[in-house]
Image (cartoon, helix red, strand yellow):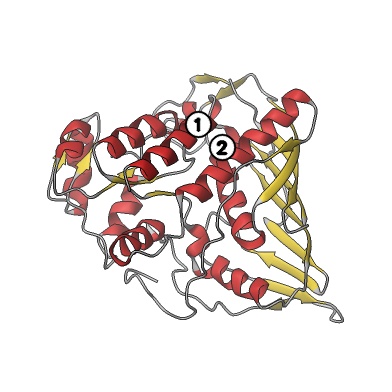
């Protein structure tokens, strides 16, 4: 559901995963669905309503814009379909909770991107953490700073509206990586601002037009994890250039340098106590190229086997809760307790390409 820019990689990868069969592609603009269906060999292009009414469809992959994630996902759940949605799970906390409630009531699965934490790079980091190579986690820093998507995205206006901005758009990659490595967040504090009231688009086809900014574009926060670690996260669309690493995790016995969580590969590096340099860690898991759809393939496999899927709605709901907590903290000037929780997903087995597809 949704045949926009991100749909291409899902359609490409989805056709290769063993547990997936893509049977239809839908969009409000049916001609756009038809174009994607032709390019990727999907047998049917249709309207959203036709997709929801199709009895062959078991799972709806929701690739619509964030503002309608909840509306589309709830309609799919009400139609008796399992749902896997692009991040964020929803724009509002209440909508996210409602999605989880409806899925539970109807005995349906709901999954949520990002699934980059299932890639070879972050699964290698998980193995490093689980083996205690850097000791007890003490702290982490995570930084994502750019000058925004208006120089490359064909229609970047939605990035600057409520439910978007750098924390909603890119924060899920960082928060998903951190929480799957360190566990749930207990409490946050944050500060946020919108630096430029207007942004000028330089990408085609809208080059020269302007965007009115209606959401914070620089968000900085501190997280207290339930396990005791203290984390710092900065996301920004207001920075021309930066030289910070993406994520570092500091332990009592060393430091782990984590790869960009918007990718599936490495590098993974460790600096151990008593040593005086970084050591490259060979990746222990496959899926190191752009493997978007891994979470969907895992959910499909879980649907057949009865086990829990890894990129779960509960994980996506916790990430959404943390994002809102940062913004609430900035607005109200106080710490915010995070009430949601999730069960930390099982790691993937090392060395095994368990879903088929490309590595």
Q: Earlier in the sequence, mark 1 or mark 2?
A: 1
**Disc 1 marks which residue?**
91
**Disc 2 marks which residue?**
168
Q: Quadrant of residue 69?
A: top left
Against 307, residue 110 (above or below) is above
**For residue 219, side relative to residue 353 (left or right):** right
* Location of the N terminus (image quadrant): top left
Q: Quadrant of residue 248?
A: bottom right
Query: Could you tell me if residue 267 is visible in this image?
Result: no
Q: Position of residue 179 (x, y in %)?
A: 62, 55
SS at mark 1 in the image: loop
**Of the pair 338 and 56, the residue shown nearer to us:** 338
Against 294, residue 67 (above or below) is above
The CA span between labels 1 and 2 is: 8 Å
Q: Quadrant of residue 54?
A: top left
Mark 1 and mark 2 in contact? Answer it, CB < 8 Å.
yes
Q: Position of residue 82 (x, y in %)?
A: 30, 47
Q: Position of residue 153 (x, y in %)?
A: 45, 37
Query: Could you tell me if residue 9 is visible in this image?
Result: yes
């Amino acid at each position: 559901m949704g045949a926009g820019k991100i749909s291409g990689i899902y359609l490409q990868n989805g056709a290769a995963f063993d547990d997936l069969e893509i049977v239809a592609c839908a969009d409000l603009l049916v001609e756009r669905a038809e174009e994607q269906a032709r390019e990727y060999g999907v047998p049917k292009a249709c309207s959203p309503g036709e997709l929801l009414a199709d009895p062959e469809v078991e799972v709806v992959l929701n690739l619509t814009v964030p503002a309608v994630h909840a509306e589309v996902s709830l309609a799919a759940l009400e139609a008796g379909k399992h749902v896997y949605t692009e991040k964020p799970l929803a724009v509002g906390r209440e909508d996210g909770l409602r999605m989880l409630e409806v899925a539970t009531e109807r005995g349906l699965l709901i999954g949520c991107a990002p699934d980059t934490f299932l890639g070879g790079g972050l699964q290698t980091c998980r193995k490093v953490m689980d083996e205690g190579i850097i000791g007890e986690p003490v702290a982490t820093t995570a930084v994502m700073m750019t000058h925004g998507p208006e120089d490359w995205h064909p229609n970047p206006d939605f990035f600057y509206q409520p439910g978007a901005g750098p924390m909603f758009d890119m924060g899920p990659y960082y928060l998903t990586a951190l929480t799957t490595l360190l566990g749930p967040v207990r409490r946050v504090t944050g500060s946020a601002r919108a630096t430029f009231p207007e942004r000028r688009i330089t990408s085609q086809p809208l080059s020269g037009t302007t965007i009115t900014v209606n959401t914070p574009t620089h968000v900085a926060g501190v997280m207290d994890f339930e396990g005791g670690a203290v984390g710092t996260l900065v996301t920004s669309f207001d920075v021309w250039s930066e030289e910070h690493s993406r994520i570092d995790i500091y332990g009592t016995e060393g430091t782990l340098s984590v790869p960009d969580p918007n990718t599936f590969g490495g590098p993974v590096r460790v600096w151990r106590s008593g040593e005086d340099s970084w050591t490259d860690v060979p990746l222990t898991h496959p899926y190191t190229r752009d493997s978007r759809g891994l979470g969907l393939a895992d959910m499909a496999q879980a649907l057949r086997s009865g086990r829990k899927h890894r990129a779960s709605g509960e994980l996506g709901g916790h990430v959404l809760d943390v994002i809102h907590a940062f913004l609430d903290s900035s607005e109200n000037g106080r710490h915010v307790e995070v009430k949601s929780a999730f069960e930390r997903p099982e790691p993937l087995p090392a060395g095994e390409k368990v879903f088929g597809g490309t590595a």
